[in-house]
Amino acid sequence: MRRTFILLLLALLMALPAAALAEAPVEAMAVEAAVELAETDLMDPAVYAGEALPQSEQAVSAAAAPVEAAVPDTAPLKLILGAGEKYTLKIDGAAGYKSSNGKVAAVSAKGVVTGVKAGKSATITVTRKKGSAQKIKVTVRKAPSKVTLNKASLTLEVGQTFRLKAKLPSKSASALKWSTGSRKVAKVDGTGLVTAVKKGTTKVRVKTFNGQTAVCTVKVVPVNPANATVRRFAEAAGVTNQQLEKAAGASIETLNTWSVDDLTRVEFVTGNVRWKMSDNQWKSVTLTGCSGKPKALTVAARYGNRLPVIGMNEGVFSGNDKLKKVVVEEGIASLPGYAFDTCVNLSDITLPASLTKVGFHSFHRVGENLAEPFYFNLPDNIAEQSFGECHSVMVCKKDSVTAHTLSDGNWDFTCPGEEDFRYRYAEYYREGSWESEEDGTWGVQLALVKYVGQGGAVKIPKGPVYIRDGAFLNCDKLTGVEIPEGVTRICNNAFDGCVSLTGVKFPATLKVIGLQAFRGVDQVKYFDLPADLTAINGNGGGAHTFEGCGAVLRVKKGSDSACLLSERNYSVTFPGEEDFRYRYEKHNVNGESVFRLYLWDYVGQGGVVVIPDGVYGVSRTPAGGSDSWHPAFFNNKSVTGVVIPEGAVIVEDSAFSGCTMLTDIRLPSTLKILKNHAFENTGTAAGKRFIVVLPAGLEEITAGTGAGWDSFNESDATIVAQNDAIRKALYDGWYVYYNTPEDAQSGANLCYKPNDDPKFKYRGCR
């Protein structure tokens, strides 16, 4: 349907008479579908104001007489005539014509419209035998008092063309009729396009409906082979003879004598850009500079409508302190050194995906006058760059060529949608300990260099492998942080001084945590650390990882992280066992180092405490010696009972010393050793004696004579010893014991002689 309609409109255009097309060479005629325009012009009204349009817009038919044409029912038309000008309507199926105002525009029974009075409009209604009526708005303007041409004389070589431009006085209208004195010398079409045919001279004339004329004398000369250079240049660059004359400051006749090299030195101006041919092959263009100091600039990839830009002079746009916006078009592959150097107010820059090279100091000091750095969006494949002192934040995709290039040049960058974060690709150890490169290999990985946001709860985007030294240093508005999977290292002082931080989510991929990484972070209750840490700096000294941090380190029981933290003198807790603090200690077993778990501290509410499974021992003095000595239940006045699980082998020095309410002690069958003061002064405030059954497999118990070193010194415990070795130790230590729980209950059978050993005898009861 639409295609048929367009064909009908084209037929109408071809059928319009010379009277209707008078001004078309000055401004193009348009016939549009009613669905797209409220009114459709037969002739553009701008013509009748005497406003000349560019040469490319002056093209229209110059038919000598109107012919019949089909006009769609739904296409209202607009017609502009000079006063006294006639135009014949030929519309399919027309049955009658009527003017709304015959004093402005009259219409005859045969459809001849006459412009009567200038300055007014009237509507012609065309009735049809079938279908709806057609309305045509007619505007009448003054008859032209003259017509002028842009050239009074013209010299052309055979085969050359030139378009003459006609102009009418303001507020006048007329169809134009073009003619030539000799078509054998030069032809002219309805748009004023003159074509040189044969050597000779003729006159080309333009005439209005009321007889006003203008004449151009056209001289046609033979083709001069020397002129081929100029023609080839103009054709390749897409410039007209007039543009070439203006750029070169010479006439066409003079230019025809120039060499190819002469022509390649001619500079042209397109918009605000100066350019010239790159070489004498007519294949490319070089940008040479900027015309004036524009505020906005487009660096086109093609000039002359045809030729690609392959080069730019160094400093081509430098020093423009007025420039604020630049668009470099797609197709440009490189920018030269100092291209925009010292464009100190430039902040809006669009670069193409095709750009791969930014020359030395191309954007040096760009944006220097701005109060805040601007965001500079970079394409993906810049392999060479120089942004020295550019007052900007570089924006590019992670893992792009550009990102690596910036990092090589010591530039941080951000990514689209991640403007709160600054990144850099840098060399770090991929594996191994923090300190030693011997057990690690170097590799370039993405690091989060700096957080510049407002704080609050922050989720770090995916991508970085490292959180670099001081990335969140003293960010006192940070309340929470989620570290993404893929991060393997949190470097020194990364979150140092984040005093409002209350929660941290670590990734399972984390391997290393550096010096003072969380120093002063005292609002976090638990740090849930991943299971596979390989290095953590801090051994309890002034530079340790969690210095001044009140958080409890929570890890998976038996994990590498739990063992590593223990080696660094950190106690840990396990999920679901938050009342207990643990450490792993290294033991030499058959020449191999084996980690064994010790319960280090109890922080619960008391009562009967059931120690979780898995412990090897209860409490242990750390490697630091007595200065950091802290038994697990030492002086706990709220614990009334304790169950030590099966598998436990040792109860260390003073583990339950001072638990004055402790009267229910259940030892595992696996227990081998009870150390000094393990249950010293237990149960003394409970007001009752209680029974402690020592397991049959117990191999060692401290029971010193009068020195106060025994395991149950000053406790109110009644001891049941179930093997001879322990009985002997207790006997030698002047300790009272029973052989069975039943004996302890009845107070009978105290101190039996084992194997009739004469050293064993009754000592009496306390």
Image (spheres, grey):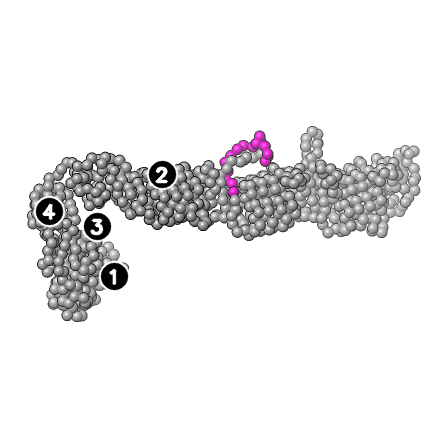
Residue 379 position by quadrant = top left
Which residue position holds label 2?
Answer: 336
Determine the residue positioned at 56% across, 45% down: 473
Which residue position holds label 3?
Answer: 56
Mark 1 residue crowding within 10 angstroms, few (<14) / some (14–19) / many (20+): some
Which residue position holds label 4?
Answer: 218
- First reached walking from the N terminus: tag 3 or tag 2: 3
> Looking at the image, do the residues carrying marks 3 and 2 touch, with CB atoms under 8 Å apart?
no
**Closer to viewer: mark 3 or mark 2:** 2
Residue 557 position by quadrant = top right
Q: Is residue 211 left or right of residue 666?
A: left
Alpha-carbon span between mark 2 and mark 4: 47 Å
Give how far across and how far down residue 582 sits, in percent.
Answer: 69, 42
Determine the residue positioned at 75% across, 39% down: 626
The answer, for residue 190, to whether it is visible in the render is: yes
Give how far across and how far down residue 681 sits, in percent.
Answer: 82, 45
> Looking at the image, do the residues carrying marks 1 and 2 touch, with CB atoms under 8 Å apart?
no
